[in-house]
Image: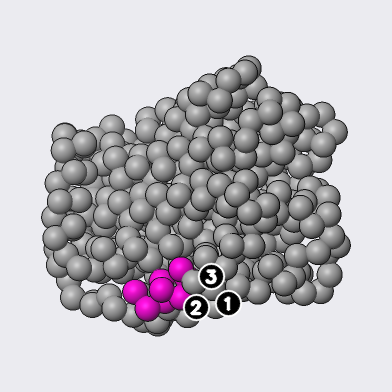
Amino acid sequence: MVEIRFTGSPHERPPVRARVHRAWLVAAVAAVAIVATGAFTTMAGLLVGPLHREFGWSRSTIGLGASVNMVLYGLTAPFSAALMDRFGMRRVVGGALAAVAAGALCTTAMTEPWQFVLSWGVLVGTGCGSMAMAFAATVTDRWFARRRGLVTGVLTAAGVFGQFAFLPLLSWTVERYAWRAAAVTLVVVVLVALPLVLLLLRDGPTDVGLRPYGAAEHTVSASRERPAPVPGAARRTVRVLARSARTGPFWLLAGTFAICGASTNGVMWTHFTPAAHDHGMPATAASSLLAAIGVFNVAGTVASGWLTDRLDPRRLLAAYYALRGLTLLALPLLLTAEIGAPLVAFAVLFGLLDVATVPPTLALCRELYGEDSAIVFGWTGAAHQLGAGLAAFAGGVARDAFGSYDPLWLGAGALCGAGALLALMVVRTRTA
């Protein structure tokens, strides 16, 4: 948007001066912070082999730490949305970045499994959870009256970009300098983002005397008043859950998002690299495939945001889950020691579908739950990470029990088929 401002008498207006609306700067800073923490999501997959070799821990033990990380990531998200209403985005996000950096540093000094659960599972999980999709929803709701689907897609894509942009570098670092050097690299990235957040992130347009991007002119005077902090963040979060849990659409959205987490974070980002390695593929090559998925994640998520502004989000979700399920069912037939055309095609299609579910899910939350939508979306995000955590743990158990990840891919594909049916059952009737 180009904002036009005039000063002086209406009869003596100076030349027009145009500048970009501040909302886009805030969205850019939020994207940088989300990118910084996004890399931690896929790092777990690179740790399985090195930790197994160095400490002799079983894959199910390592999967437990990754599972705790994902579950706490999800449970933190709805409370962080309410805490942002109470204390402001800048304080919550700044504290979250500090927690992530501390957890990653503690991981480099661990010697026991419980320390991995505490540092990577608890500290990194809660810190990243505070920077999760509820943060993107809060930024979008506060700063944008228009282009919400597009902005949601861009911020979601930022998290995906963070997950995969650093993956080849981290994989190379693990092979060349060991896994601790890769963890320190992520700490440096987070510490670069922290001052940008503290200096440039603002809680709402009223902080700088503006109205949200695309808001009507008659809202100008109202937007000059900065809203008071909302007390009782934890109580409000629980109350919103209690209200929304009495509605059918909440459970349908939570169910589809749990399947989303299980079929992406839970199986792909934790187990794809070791599964490919089982077929003789080098870890760097497998990480390159995941990075390619991340590239197409960005395109798919932004396109999904654009489509969400124009089409029925329920039908979009059904199509995304159905197609994702087919790709996962085909994966056991495609994995080989080398990257060929079939695996490249899988990476492209899975990448386009991977995080495309976020914009339509958020749009349905906003339509159905109004001003509580960011917190409701945070709770659906908790279901997403619960599904991811269970799948991450189940993947380790399956590999230890069967010597193969094939049952994991088949189960995830079947779940996606169920997710497509659940999405079509959502009734678009406002409940709050």
Residue indicated by mark 1 = 326
Question: How far apart, in angstroms, are the residues tagged by discs 1 and 2?
Answer: 7 Å
Q: Is residue 209 visible?
A: no
Crowding near pointer 2: few (<14 within 10 Å), some, many (20+)? many
The span shown in magenta is 415-422
Residue at x-position 65% and y-position 74%: 330
Residue at x-position 77% and y-position 74%: 342
Q: Position of residue 143 (x, y in %)?
A: 36, 53
Q: Position of residue 275 (x, y in %)?
A: 70, 54
Secondary structure beneath label 2 = helix
Residue 364 vertical placement versus 199 (above, below): below
Residue at x-position 15% and y-position 51%: 242
Residue at x-position 86% and y-position 62%: 338
Residue indicated by mark 2 = 322
Mark sitting on residue 413? 3
Question: First in sequence: mark 1 or mark 3?
Answer: 1
Q: Position of residue 10 (x, y in %)?
A: 31, 60
Observer-nearest residue: 114 or 428? Answer: 114
- Which amino acid is tagged 1? Leu
Which quarter of the rendering shows the C terminus? Answer: bottom left
| Image marks 1 and 2: residues in contact by CB distance under 8 Å | yes
Q: Is residue 92 visible?
A: yes
- Which amino acid is tagged 3? Gly
Observer-nearest residue: 278 or 24? Answer: 278
